[in-house]
Image (cartoon, coloured by chain):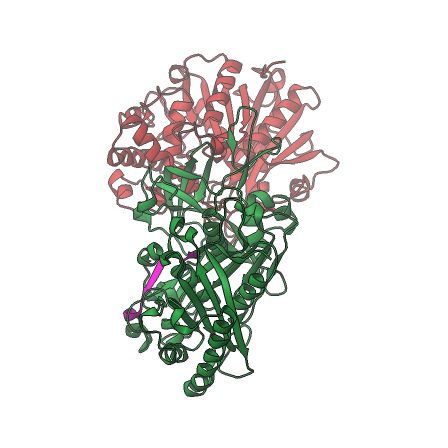
Chain colours: A red, B green
Amino acid sequence: MGSHGIKDRVAIVGMGCTRFAEHWDKGLDDLLLDASDEAFTSAGVTKEDVDAYWVGTAQGGMSGMILAKPLQLEGKPVTRVENMCATGSEALRQAAYAVASGAYDLAMAVGVEKVKDSGYQGLNAFPVPSDGTQRTLTAAAMFSMVAPAYSERYGVPMDELKAVLARIASKNHHNGARNPRAQFRREMSVEQILAMPPVAGCLSVFDCAGVADGAAAAIVCRAEDAHRYTDKPLYVKALSFVAGNGSGVTDPGYDYTTFPEIAACASDAYAQAGVTDPRAELAMAEVHDCFTPTELVLMEDLGFSERGTAWKDIEAGAFDLTGDLPVNPDGGLKSFGHPVGASGLRMMFEAWLQLRQEAPPERQIATVPDRSLALTHNLGGYPGEMVSFISILGT
Amino acid sequence: MAPRGVLGAAAYLPHRRLDRTTIAAVAGGGGGKGTRTVASYDEDTTTMGVEAARLALAGLGPGAADRIDALWFSTVAPAYADKTNATAIHAALRLDRASPAFDVNGAVRSAVGALRATLSGAGTSLVVAADLRSGLAGGPDEAAFGDGAAALVVGPAAEGAPLLAEVIGKGGATEEMLDRWRTPGDARSRVWEERFGETRYVPLGVEAWEAALKHAGLVADQVDRVIVTGTHGRANTALAKKLGLGDRLVDDLSSTVGNTGAAHPALLLTSALEAAQPGQVLALVTLADGADAVIFRATDAVAGWSPRRPLAMQATAGAPIPYGTYLRWRGVLPAEPPRRPEPARPSASASARSSDWKFGFVGSTDDAGEVHLPPQPAETEQVAMADAQGTVVTFTVDRLAYSPSPPVVFAVVDFDGGGRLPVELTDVDADEVRIGARVELTFRKLFTADGIHNYFWKARLLPAATDGGGA
């Protein structure tokens, strides 16, 4: 028994990522085709060369046929996966394990979400028949409860904490402004963000991820075959997943200043990859900045900052594009929006660009090539009840 | 046969009060002086009935719910037709499965009918009445009416539960006449010319009064306190004058509460009992499609009775509601709904499986005694938490979530004795909440979808006077 990981046994050899936007003129099929075609081209393969497919979508449709139909796949195994906001990452995880097992030589993971056809703002889960007692609060409100809890526990005055949160959003907007694939490409100052009215707790809309359509894809093979497809593969160093049991929601001991599922997931991922000092060893991290307080707490749960100190590191610019550990160099969910099935693979796409030094110069991080590891992280759910995914990828 | 009477009584007034002087500026007329009670957007007659019944049972001490042989529920504003409403009250109170729950609905007089029937019957009954009373904007009914509920525990004395008041006389008179009527589904009642009703009701009242006195073997002067209420305001006043009641007349709460329809007789009886002295004779005279009179004698036990949340206290509490909000809550003023998907209807079968939780707020405990809300599927030990009080650990105000009346105020609550639940707050303004605030649970309607009322519990701030106490 044990979580052994598949360090250096699987490589990503091609990737694709659409622009994330309000794609009024593109449907789910179009987005899937765009991301898939870019990934095929990137790896120099055709759809026939890929032996098995995993398609991640939270609400885009049922079964593998949502990919088999637009790609017109003939006799291929296609599996649709869903794991809340980690859906796209889950697709990659399954594809990676499939080639590691030897069952297939070449596999593709593609994630997609067509959010903007619902007619409502924000993300809206489809209803599962229930007894009607589940809370109906928005995710923004659930995560907003982190801010006062953090303020209270670590003695950071709310006004100062709000400025820290605004700095997180401002940083991600700064990075997104330098990314042609991002939904929002405008810089926002801390002052502009602080002037916005609250919509949930102390959070304004600028503390929340955008809402966009998009798709992203990755092609994986066993590590020894990687150079058939690319000179610069990314190797899978760790894939970790934790599904919470919801105890934080019912446990009076839970204080809303940490996400225990993520700390556990990070511990497993670092063990798989042999990382002992993530702040010093990672070149970059793409984290799930669904709301600004989330990114704040993640810096501590992922081991980038000591408990109670992330707010100081953020103020000091440690996670800026030019900081000692750039976080969300592509602009994050803040700039990209969050097409649920696609986000995890979009994060890996940034690792693909940055570690291969193919990011545009105005966004290329300076920690590469001295460091060669990137972390991507997704969470789905709410404080106290969430799923967590972490990958560590490296050249 | 053992003497019967009232063992427990409680009223429930909703939190909000409409200042009648604010009506005319909007409606162009109407209104008046004083206030009326207004049920919250998340209350209906069933939820208010639950609240009154909880208070009545709480006054009887632990295990009171187990002594109830039957539940009777009356309202002229039922949440459902065809389907019994009393069963939701039965479930929220966790009454015995073998004890039936009946609706006696439709007419204002039904409530007094249930009271008279149970006073004459056998066993111990919980007699609940609730009403949500409206009229069209600017009309006399809108201002004169109120919302509220009352519950009486009726039966013979039991171990540890003495009679507060013994019934000693009953009388009535019935006559088919047209004074006040409403077509089912209409928001307003219609009334015939006032003078006609008055001239019929006063003799009916006298007839019932005299019959009850005769039954009790009393003369009029021996009655200390008299309640006169009914569906015709002028007739009530005229009858009180005709009977020469003077200061023996019990305040009908029209200046603070308004006339709560089917709930009003039990509500005023509760009020009279709270003020009663041992040995006092109390009469309840009601005018509604006839007249009914019931005479009680307060027992020695009334002196030692301390109601859980006295009506006298509730009547002076509460918080104002703007007339515009009142109109929106009543659906008189159609308001733009939140631009969010409307919630899906709750599942009948899922609700049935989780009935103890959804209606009764029953959690579970693990081997170490930790309380879990909602109950964990693997844990078989149940723990009733509806009467628990708790403390706000953290909270938020959600201006994005769907609500019939945004914004949603929401808190993480840790309960005394264990257990935590993130739960919506109600009867609260967003700026009233603070970490550390003390809360209690209240049975509410979260929303209605497909005609299905989604009942569940919310939390509300404890009244300051009862903070931390079980008074």
Residue A223 x %, y %: 60, 17
Q: Is residue B16 magenta?
A: yes
Q: Could you say which quadrant of the image residue A53 lies in?
A: top right
Q: Is residue B131 above or below residue B378?
A: below
Give left or right: position of B385 versus B310.
right
Residue A216 x %, y %: 54, 36
Residue depicted at x 44% and y 17%: A372
Give left or right: position of B426 versus B360.
left
Q: Quadrant of the C terminus of chain B?
A: top left
Q: Is residue A167 magenta?
A: no
B60 and A38: which is toward the camera: B60
Residue depicted at x 49% and y 59%: B166
B190 and A280: which is toward the camera: B190
- Number of callouts: 0
Q: Quadrant of the N terminus of chain B?
A: bottom right
* Outermost residue to the right: A75
Q: Is residue A8 above or below residue A218?
A: above
Residue B43 x %, y %: 46, 57
Residue A173 x %, y %: 35, 37
B81 and A95: which is toward the camera: B81
Residue depicted at x 36% and y 64%: B257
Residue depicted at x 51% and y 23%: A391
B172 and A184: which is toward the camera: B172
Q: Which residues are magenta?
A: B11-22
